[in-house]
Image (tube, rainbow, N blue to C red):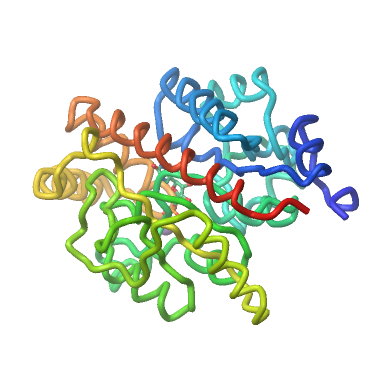
Amino acid sequence: MASALPLTFSPDVRRALDAGQPVVALESTIITHGMPWPGNLEMALAVEAIIRDGGAVPATIAVLDGKLHIGLEEDRLTHLAKTSDALKVSRADLPFAMATGRTGATTVAATMIAAERAGIRVFATGGIGGVHRGAEESFDISADLDELARTKVIVVCAGAKAILDIPKTLEVLESKGVPVVTFASDTLPAFWSRESGISTPLRLDDPAQIVGFQHARDSLGIDGGMLVANPVPQDHEIPREEMERHISEALQQAEAQGIKGKDVTPFLLANIFEITGGRSLETNIALVKNNAVLAARIASAFPSN
Ligand code: PSU
Ligand code: MN
C-alpha cells in the first residue's frame, strides 16, 4: 500500500510496520522552530530513545530536500536540527516543500497526514496549535484543529499551548467532533502547567481504554483523529498563575513587533524561553518525554496486525 505513496521510510520503521510492530510518529517543527540548537537535537534523540524503551519504534517525520521521510536516521536528524532555514510545513505547504525540493519541518497537521498515509496510528508531540488569543480579530486558528477532524491518528500532547485561548480551542474541537481525552486527570492540562482550570470533556486512565475507544470509533466508521492530553509531571510543571504573567508579557511583545501568521507560535515560545530564563524549555522537554512514554504504551496496546 505505502509503496505507491511518495514516502521515504527509514529501514527500522519500514521493518516495524511490515511486522505489525508498534510505531510512534514524531513531528519536526518542535525541533527546528520550537527549541534552540543543540538542546533540540538532545530532546529529539532522548524522545526516540524513550519510545524504543517503551517497546515501539520512533518515526520522526520531516521533508528533506523534497523527500518526505518517515523515520530519520541519526545523521539526518542531526542535519535537520542544525538547519536554520527549514520551512514550517502544515497541510497547505507540505506538498509545496516536496514539489520544490525544499527542507521542511512538519507541524502537527502535516505530521498527522504523513503518519496516516504511512499506516502509523499514534503520534507524540508537545502541544497542538489551536485558537490564538484575539482570534476574533486575527482569525488565527491553527490548521492542526481541522486535521484532527479529518485524519485518523491519535495525537498525544500536554494540552493546547497555554499561549492559546484554551476554551475557544476546545469549542472548535467540539464543533468538529474531535474527542479530547485527558489521561488520568479530571482537568485539562495547559502545556507548562498541569491545570488549565477547565474540566476535561472525557477522561481515561489506561492506554488499553484509549485503544478500545478508537476501536469503537472505527466500528462506526467515524473518521478523524483523537486528542489525548497528558499532564506534565508535577516536578517539572510551572504553575498556571506564574505562566500567565510570562505569557502576557510575550503576547505584548508579539503585538509590539507586529508578529503575524505562522511566526506567532515560534516567536512566543522563544520569548517565553527568554523571560523564564530557560525554565520553560526544561518543562517543554519534560512534557514531550512524558508524552512519548504514553504514546509508546498506547501504540503497544493496539493488537498487532
Ligand atoms: N508545540 C511546541 N513547539 C512547537 C509546536 C508545538 O512545544 O513548535 C508547533 C507544532 O508543530 C504545532 C505548531 O503544530 O507549533 C502550530 O503552529 P501554528 O499555530 O502556526 O499552526
Ligand atoms: Mn496560526
- The number of numbered badges drawn on the structure is 0
Q: Is residue 81 above or below residue 156?
A: above
Which residue: 22% across, 66% down? Answer: 198
- Foreground pick, 246 / 66: 246
Q: Is residue 203 left or right of residue 300?
A: left
Residue visible at 38% across and 41% down? 266
Q: In the shown orientation, is residue 162 left or right of residue 48?
A: left
Q: Residue at x 80, y 38 (%)?
A: 14
- Front residue of 77 and 93: 77
Residue 303 appears in which quarter of the rendering? Answer: bottom right
Residue at the location (58% across, 48% down)? 89
Q: Nearer the viewer, residue 110 or 188?
A: 188
Left-right relation of 251 to 132: left
Percent position (x, y) of residue 245?
Answer: 10, 46
Q: Is residue 43 above or below residue 228?
A: above
Is 300 or 43 nearer to us in this picture? 300
User: Where residue 131 sits in the image (x, y, percent)?
Assistant: 35, 65
Which quarter of the rendering shows the C terminus?
A: bottom right
Give residue 217's quadrant in the image. bottom right
Quadrant of the rendered image holding ligand 2: bottom left
Q: Position of residue 256 (x, y in %)?
A: 20, 47
Q: Could you tell me residue 59's position as x and y percent?
A: 65, 38
- Residue 1 falls in which quadrant of the image? bottom right
Compared across the picture, whether 128 is left or right of 12 comes to left
